[in-house]
Amino acid sequence: MIKKRKIFFTIASGGHETDKHYYETIKTKRSVEEISNFLSRTESLNLKTYTHDRPYAVWGAVPGSGNIRTWETMDQGDYVLVYRSGKIIAAAEVAAKIRNPNLATFFWDKDINGKTWELTYFLTNLIEVNVNQTSLNKYLGYKENYSPRGFMSIDQDKTDKLLMNYGDLLSLLTKLQKGEKLEHIEVGKEILQEYVDDQIKTAPTEHTEMQWHLISIGNKTKLDVWIPPADQGREYANNKFRDHILSDFRESIDVPSYIKNIDTVWKLGLSIKAAFEIENSTSIYSGILRLSDLKALAPNSNYPLFIVANRDKKSRVFDQLRRPTFANDYLQLDKQVRYLSYDKVRELDNQDCPQFFDVNFIVSAGELVS
């Protein structure tokens, strides 16, 4: 079932205390271990499992009838926008929510009325930005001078239109911060091309080996890994793929279902972190075509895309990426798809990987068209 994601506003303005809270639990992430005494065993385990022991940003709301109603509608995978003085200063994905006054007091003490921000929620995939609210309003269908008031959710119709027409919110904000125009998704949420199985021209062991290395690297950097269902029963060097990958993709309205066809996808929560097409046939075109279809369905996405191929095919990969059908002003795959050699993938799997995923780790290993 495709998840509809909600978008919430929360306000981080109000003087020194709010700034201090923001620094201590959003800008500075908090580990599950340090708060384990306030959590049940199940809550601790769920938090550790969801992001593979990563620390979290944490925020909360003081209980009141409106805040309680809003907080109760919040689900895992929803978005939170942090607003201050006319700007969106941060955005993240909800990992969990816990109503716990003792935990909230530990984080933020109490306000002047003796209340604490016990409607607590844990955030992952946080990005800090500096985006004028007016820049986002036109895409949400609000008047130019609209500004949020307190802890609130955006009308679901507005949210659905934004995510279906422009894609995932974190990527959109990144583009808006750069002053870039958002590309409207002109195609439906359907596959543009049939999946082309062109692997019969070479032994499948090379493809399987590369897929295993990408699974392994993803696991080492504590990401979730997805591969197409047809590949999930494979194994390499006695490593059964099913033991190391997601059993369910967990679709959402702002991520095209077509990405499930890509050879290897790295995820954290509902957010995509990288996508890889592995080529071991004589046809480089079909792999790039799959990435082209993906980019057409998610033109504002900013996760890196890769073609993985043998070193002797590098020039052919670049030649294909330069083709007008891929290097046009809309897709610009020649500026976005990176080439990774088999040797480089093996090297990355054999070396020490970052404890947690750092996009520069994989981006710096790839090569753009020169």
Image (cartoon, rainbow, N blue to C red):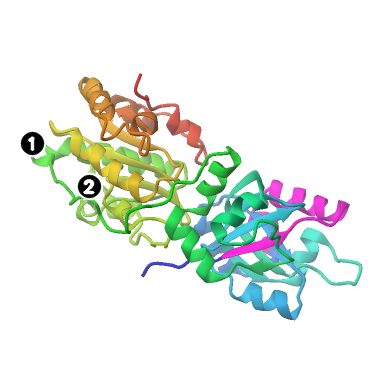
* Residue 32 seen in render: yes
**Residue 134, percent across and down?**
65, 52
For this view, does 112 lie left or right of residue 44?
A: right
Residue 39 in view: no
Badge 2 or badge 1: first in the primary sequence: 1
| Res. 41 image quadrant | bottom right
In depth, the one of 48 and 188 nearer the eye is 188
Provide residue 221's location: percent of width, then percent of height.
Answer: 46, 41
Is 14 contained in the magenta span? yes
Would you name the residue on which mark 2 appears? 235
Vertical comparison of 11 with 327: above or below: below
Q: Residue furthest right?
A: 112
The residue sitting at 11% across, 36% down in the picture is: 203
Quarter of the rendering occupied by the N terminus:
bottom left
Magenta range:
7-36
Q: Residue at x 18, y 50 (%)?
A: 195
Residue nearest the observer in this picture, 60 or 38 = 60
Residue at mark 2 to residue at mark 1: CA–CA distance:
20 Å
The residue carrying mark 1 is 201
Can you name the residue that lies furthest to the left here?
201
- Callout 1 crowding tier (Cα within 10 Å): few <14, some 14–19, many ≥20: few
